[in-house]
Image (spheres, grey):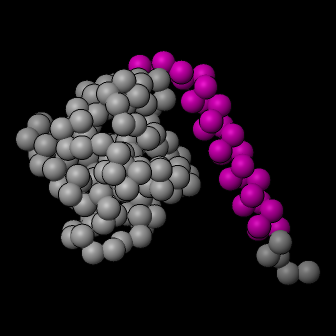
Amino acid sequence: MKIGIGSDHNGFELKEAIKEFISSTEHEVVDYGCHSCNAVDYPDVAFDVSKAISEGDLDRGILICGTGIGVCIAANKYPGIRAALAHDTYSAERAQLSNNAQILTMGAQIIGVELGKKVVESYLNAEWANGSKRKVDKIIENENKFLRDHYQEAAAGNQCS
């Protein structure tokens, strides 16, 4: 699989360790930044990874910030993306098995490198098994309906009279 990885400055060190770990497996890893401990806004990195997944350039993504919450919220704002926060192997596995989450998020201030590697390994080794397909389909349908309705309203409001 082709895996995108990104972090803000709070997650930089964990991102680098996870990137090295993924590179030692059969997976290809693409680094979306940040590239130092200098301050970076986590939504920028989250949107870049989300966009790449949405456009089919990546199979999955891993995002890291201080708590994992910010990057999770940001990624989930991107249409069609399902990001899941996990700090344990069971949740990471279930994010993929049950929910077909394209992005795993973690908090560098919450977990250490060794647990982070195990969490990522569980996520990457899990395959979508249509576990909650009916429920995931409802999420997708609701999102698509919202986007259709919202853009129709916006287009109607922009027409000349």
- Residue at x 41%, y 64% (from the top left corner): 42
**80 or 84: nearer the viewer:** 84
- Residue at x 8%, y 41% (from the top left corner): 24
Q: Per the image, is 130 magenta?
A: yes
Residue found farthest to the right = 161
Image spot of residue 97 (x, y percent): 41, 23
**101 or 40: nearer the viewer:** 40
Q: Per the image, is 143 magenta?
A: yes
Q: Determine which quarter of the picture holds residue 110.
A: top left
- Residue 148 lies, with reference to residue 126, above or below; the image says below
- Residue 60 lies, with reference to residue 42, above or below; the image says above
Quadrant into which the N terminus falls: top left
- Residue at x 76%, y 68% (from the top left corner): 155
Instruction: Considering the whole magenta stretch, tell me its main secondary structure.
Output: helix
The region drawn magenta spans 128-156
Residue 55 lies left or right of residue 15; in this view the side is: right
Quadrant into which the C terminus falls: bottom right
Residue found farthest to the left = 24
- Residue at x 61%, y 25% (from the top left corner): 135
Image spot of residue 117 (x, y percent): 21, 38
**Can residue 32 be seen in the rendering of this structure?**
no
- Residue 148 lies, with reference to residue 82, above or below; the image says below
Image spot of residue 9 (x, y percent): 30, 66
Marker count (numbered): 0
Image spot of residue 120 (x, y percent): 26, 37
Residue 13 lies left or right of residue 59; in this view the side is: left
Q: Determine which quarter of the picture holds residue 152.
A: bottom right
**Can residue 89 be seen in the rendering of this structure?**
yes
